[in-house]
Image (cartoon, grey):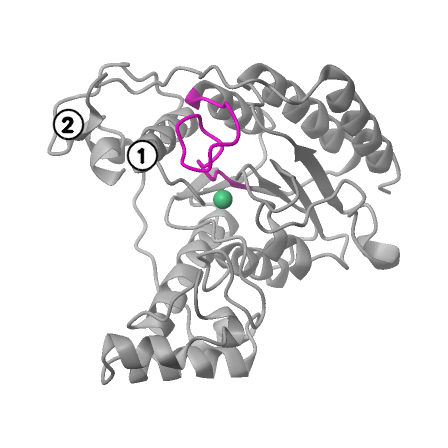
Amino acid sequence: MHELIKAYGLTQKCQLIESIAANESQLRSFHSEEYLNFAKYISKELLTQTDDQMNDDFTNEEFGIGYDCPPIPQLYELIAQIAGSSICAANAIITKKCDVAINWFGGWHHANKDEASGYCYTNDIVFAILHLLEKGFTKILYIDLDVHHGDGVQNAFAHTNKVLSVSFHKYEIGFFPGTGDINDIGFGSKGKYHSVNIPLKDGITDECYVDIFKKVLDKIKCCYRSQVIICQCGADGLIGDPMNSFNLTIKGYSQCVEHLISFDVPLILLGGGGYNILNTARLWTALTACALNEQLDNDIPDHSCFLEYRPTYELLIEAGHRPNINSNQYIDSVLQKVLQNLDSIK
Ligand SMILES: [Zn+2]
């Protein structure tokens, strides 16, 4: 991804900010001491154990470390780097270094206070939001475009009205993480109506997705005056992703991000899932261009990874023929309920 962004000459048009790892006290603002100690223990233990010993030790999924999130060397250091990267992005917005901050290394939306989950050992998005709250921001809009529900972020802020969390995701029995029902709207007198869930089904097209996205976001623009927007741009809703779910293309995602840019509110763009790595690289390159208001040639420029992009050697991808299971009636009913709930935000 970085090579592709460079090949298009976009890095020269960005201000590059070096990421700083989060320190222990920052990490403790979200994670429990027990979880961080366990991560440190893994970092230390893995230096001395064989693979077999290691696998035997982590079969009970303590703190979520096991199958989805295997023990890995330097786990604690990785957590500190991931968390720190989005704190730096938030800081760039706070200090007004830029209007749009991008961290494609971020977007690890599933991790909880004391639990790794869904490939996420930490939740950089929560750290970015906590940093903004600490600096006095009181209206933060979080949007999650990943095909999976943004459960970790929603859980962390389900009781507050200072964060409005909006997730567009596939919702189907057996599909990870299994949360994100339309009736899941937040808790307590402050949090109620500040979790917004848009459960979707397989095969959704750009046209349908962008339409529902704009209607929900335009409503939010009226009822919640966000001071900053954070958008997780997980690429696993793209056609061709091994998640095999939505029928989205780079154009659909770009229209959503362009719409957010048009709000003229400071914006943080983050990465997320994306298991067809070439299409993920294509998407995040195209979204970097959106942020810079640059038009990219559809022919991928020659660079060190050029041959990987065969057979098309093109930036954009075509929609597939997967049937759209979301009927107009279903989408209308989801929209009606979501917009009605948003009416209750004061
Ligand atoms: Zn995902």
Q: What residue type is labelled 1?
A: Ala
In the rendered image, residue 5, in percent from the top left (x then y), is placed at: 26, 32
> Which of the 4 image quarters holds residue 189?
bottom right
Badge 2: residue crowd in 10 Å (few <14, some 14–19, many ≥20): some
Nearer to the camera, 72 or 100:
72
Badge 1: residue crowd in 10 Å (few <14, some 14–19, many ≥20): many
Q: Mark 1 points at which residue?
A: 281
Question: Would you place residue 289 above or below residue 172 in this image?
Answer: above
At 30% from the left edge and 20% from the top edge, which residue is drawn?
315
In the rendered image, residue 110, in percent from the top left (x then y), is placed at: 54, 56
In the rendered image, residue 158, in percent from the top left (x then y), is placed at: 73, 56
Q: Judge whether residue 244 is colored magenta.
A: yes
SS at badge 2: helix
At 65% from the left edge and 31% from the top edge, which residue is drawn?
200
Q: Which amino acid does label 2 sit on?
A: Phe
Q: Distance between the residues labelled 1 and 2?
A: 12 Å
Query: Is residue 110 visible in this depiction of the protein?
Result: yes
Nearer to the camera, 222 or 174:
174
Question: Would you place residue 22 above or below residue 100 in this image?
Answer: below
On the rendered image, what quadrant is the N terminus found in? top left
Q: Name the residue under label 2.
A: 306
Extent of the magenta region: 231-250
Q: Judge whether residue 254 is colored magenta.
A: no
- Magenta: main secondary structure equals loop
In the rendered image, residue 274, in percent from the top left (x then y), is placed at: 40, 40
